[in-house]
């Protein structure tokens, strides 16, 4: 079976009703990222950060995978599919994708806010939609924080993602503005023989190596079109 690697960003979940980031003037649900998605924000105002992610988690739990998530899961019948996502939602998993690597974490898990916990801290599933600063704590007594990679933090899964991308026979980039580094660099890791596609309504505005074929459509239409190309 050919190895098909999907690299998704926030646009993948737009049709599920989850706002992207760049499409709203660099604000994330009306917040500046510096105020809610950095270690400095957590140090300064953990209540705000916790409230922000509790609200995101609530939205994500209420959302459903869209047609694009479902088509990607169905492609497992014909390809060895590996998803690499920048998204912190779990919509790929809920659509049935079996191999999903989260580069920026998964909002349904928490970890200790102990600064010494490191990149491979124990993860705890979050049962409801909220984390409580005063009662949800790790065994050492530090409050639990969302398992998300904040701006300025390391991306521990990056080297694994790089290895996976290098092995792709087919590489599909969907719904990402490719502005967030280091992960945007993955588009340059493909082998010279890979078939590469970029699906995004703004695909034609993106500068990419010539190896990429651009499909300037929303995720569901774009992946549907690609499925026809790959299966005929
Ligand atoms: N769902 C989520 O988990 C979520 C949502 C917002 C932001 N984020 C985080 O913010 C960062 C933002 O970077 P990014 O590049 O992923 O997103 P981004 O917001 O920077 O870019 C979104 C991209 O999606 C495209 N898009 C908009 N509607 C689309 C649709 N219907 N179908 C396909 N594409 C569409 C836009 O043209 C744009 O290129 C990520 O690292 C991510 O962790 C995550």
Image (cartoon, rainbow, N blue to C red):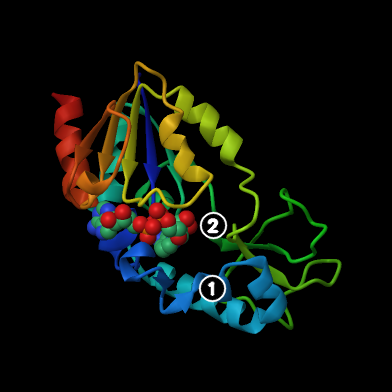
Where residue 136 sits, quadrant-wise, is bottom right
Q: Secondary structure at mark 2?
A: strand
In the rendered image, residue 155, in percent from the top left (x then y), is placed at: 61, 47
Q: Is mark 2 within 8 Å of ligand 1?
A: no
From the viewer's side, name the closer residue of 26 and 97.
26
Q: Residue 118: which disc?
A: none
Q: Is mark 1 within 8 Å of ligand 1?
A: no
Where residue 209 sits, quadrant-wise, is top left
Q: Is residue 27 visible?
A: yes
At x 41%, y 79%, the residue is 30
In the rendered image, residue 157, in percent from the top left (x then y), is placed at: 60, 42
Q: Residue 53: which disc?
A: 1
Compared to residue 191, the image places residue 143 above or below, namely below
- Ligand 1's quadrant is bottom left
Q: Secondary structure at mark 1?
A: helix
Query: Disc 2 or 1, which lies upstream in sequence?
Result: 1
Query: Which residue has dot 2 on it?
Result: 106
The quadrant of the picture occupied by the N terminus is: top left
Left or right of 84, for residue 108: right
Compared to residue 125, the image places residue 132 above or below, namely below
The quadrant of the picture occupied by the C terminus is: top left
Left or right of 40, for residue 205: left
Compared to residue 232, the image places residue 47 above or below, namely below
At x 54%, y 53%, the residue is 104
What distance separates the C-alpha of mark 2 from that of mark 1?
11 Å
């Amino acid at each position: 079976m050919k190895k098909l690697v999907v690299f998704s960003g926030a646009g993948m979940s737009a049709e599920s009703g989850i706002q992207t980031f760049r499409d709203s003037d660099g604000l994330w649900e009306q917040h500046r990222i510096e105020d809610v998605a950095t270690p400095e924000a957590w140090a300064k105002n953990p209540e705000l950060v916790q409230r922000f992610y509790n609200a995101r988690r609530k939205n994500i739990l209420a959302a459903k995978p869209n047609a694009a998530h479902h088509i990607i899961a169905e492609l497992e019948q014909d390809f060895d599919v590996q998803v690499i996502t920048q998204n912190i939602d779990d919509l790929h998993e809920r659509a049935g994708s079996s191999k999903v690597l989260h580069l920026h974490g998964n909002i349904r898990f928490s970890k200790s806010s102990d600064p010494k916990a490191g990149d491979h801290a124990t993860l705890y599933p979050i049962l409801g939609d909220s984390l409580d600063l005063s009662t949800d704590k790790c065994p050492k007594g530090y409050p639990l924080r969302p398992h998300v990679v904040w701006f300025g933090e390391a991306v521990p899964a990056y080297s694994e993602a790089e290895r996976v991308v290098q092995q792709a026979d087919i590489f599909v980039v969907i719904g990402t503005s490719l502005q967030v580094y280091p992960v945007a660099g993955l588009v340059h890791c493909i082998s010279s023989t890979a078939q590469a596609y970029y699906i995004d309504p703004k695909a034609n505005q993106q500068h990419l190596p010539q190896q990429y074929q651009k499909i300037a459509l929303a995720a569901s239409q774009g992946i549907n079109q690609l499925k026809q190309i790959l299966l005929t």
